[in-house]
Amino acid sequence: MAISRLQTSLAAVTNEVTLAAANINFDFTLVKCEVPKEYESLGKSLSIKRKEQAVMGSSHITARRLGALFEGVCPPTPNLIKAYGTRASEIVTSAKVLSTEPSGSVFAAHSGIDGTSIWAAATSSALHVQLLACMLARIWTAPEATSIWFELAQERRKNIGVRYEEGETLRFSTLAAAAQSEISRSNLAEWDASARSWLRTADQVMTKKQQQLMLIIANVNILVNEDMTVLSSVMSAWRSALETVENVVSGMPQAINSGPTLLALTAWHLYPNILVIGKITSQVRLEDSLISPGGTLTIGLARATADDDRHGVYWLLSLAHLDCYGHPVRSGANLSQDSAKFTFP
């Protein structure tokens, strides 16, 4: 009986015969959440069109639907959310000073810093999802990251279907997000592209500290995790990074032996003091004012692996939706000083 109900639920979600709620037609553009005060400077810095897109357009809908789909899966991280917003506001302030584009140009309404994904997430209570977008954009190419997002959303919808069929009480917004049609690849690609654009701007502003962090990463050999299944691997890396960085920002020393935290730090532009233990132990003091005293990170220099030539943080996944047709594609991504660049669709 349990197998039969599971199969029925999976089929229902896959065929978009909704979760016993076939008439759900929830307009996600209507959902607005209070923006944390740390993000207000970012919102004021966006161009008119970017802000409209983040508050009323497809970016807002994507952020809100992803936020609803993954609601409750992440641990609370109040100090990380504050630190990320403060850093984002610092970055946009510095970027505006460095910008050479005239404010009165004909393209002014469409140009400027692309913080669309952050503002869309901030107005949708989906900042954890935007943090994941930056992690994926940092290490995977644009087509790979879009494929990962597509599979994450698809598998999460199936999971919600199973839980509903088993009688679990779920939030209406979560049911609505799962019951509606799948989020299109074009919207997910747009979501990923905005995160990539933000990373490029933030890297330019935070050049010195970012280069120091990437030098450390170039001398380690760490796997994100050993799970090649997209949903479970990404969820594990996401939660691990959130928990560890929250503790570091809060002033709690942390020791790591896997890659999610280092990947996250490069993507979220937060820089704790780091102790690297290996043949030669060294301490790198990045002196980030957003890290509370005591929030140091200890990492090992190397990890046993069959590939002795690999350096940095690397991630292996089997991507079922990288190609429109055919079998899943075994894919690997590497984050090191030489690979810290971005691809766009």
Image (cartoon, grey):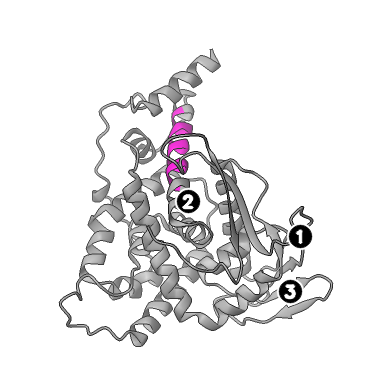
Residue under circle 1? 308
Quadrant for residue 271, please give it.
bottom right
Comparing 36 with 183, the one in front is 183
Crowding at dot 2, Cα within 10 Å, few <14 / some 14-19 / many 20+, comes out as many
Residue under circle 2? 144
Query: Which of marks 2 and 3 precedes in the sequence?
Result: 2
Residue 150 lies in the magenta stretch: yes
Label 3 sits on a secondary structure element that is: strand
CA separation in Å, label 1 and label 3: 22 Å
Is 45 drawn above or below residue 319 in the view shown? below
Foreground tag (1 vs 3):
1
Query: Which of marks 1 and 2 precedes in the sequence?
Result: 2
Q: Position of residue 63 (x, y in %)?
A: 36, 52
Circles 2 and 1: CB distance less than 8 Å?
Answer: no
Quarter in which the C terminus is drawn:
bottom left
Residue positioned most to the left = 106
Circles 3 and 2: CB distance less than 8 Å?
Answer: no
Query: Which of marks 3 and 1 precedes in the sequence?
Result: 3
Q: Residue at x 17, y 83 (%)?
A: 104
Q: Position of residue 157 (x, y in %)?
A: 43, 35
The region drawn magenta spans 149-161
Is 274 drawn above or below residue 256 in the view shown? below
Q: Position of residue 190 (x, y in %)?
A: 33, 55
Comparing 165 with 60, the one in front is 60
Q: Residue at x 17, y 81 (%)?
A: 105
The answer, for residue 303, to whether it is visible in the render is yes
Q: Amino acid at mark 2?
A: Glu
CA separation in Å, label 3 and label 2: 32 Å
Residue positioned most to the top = 1
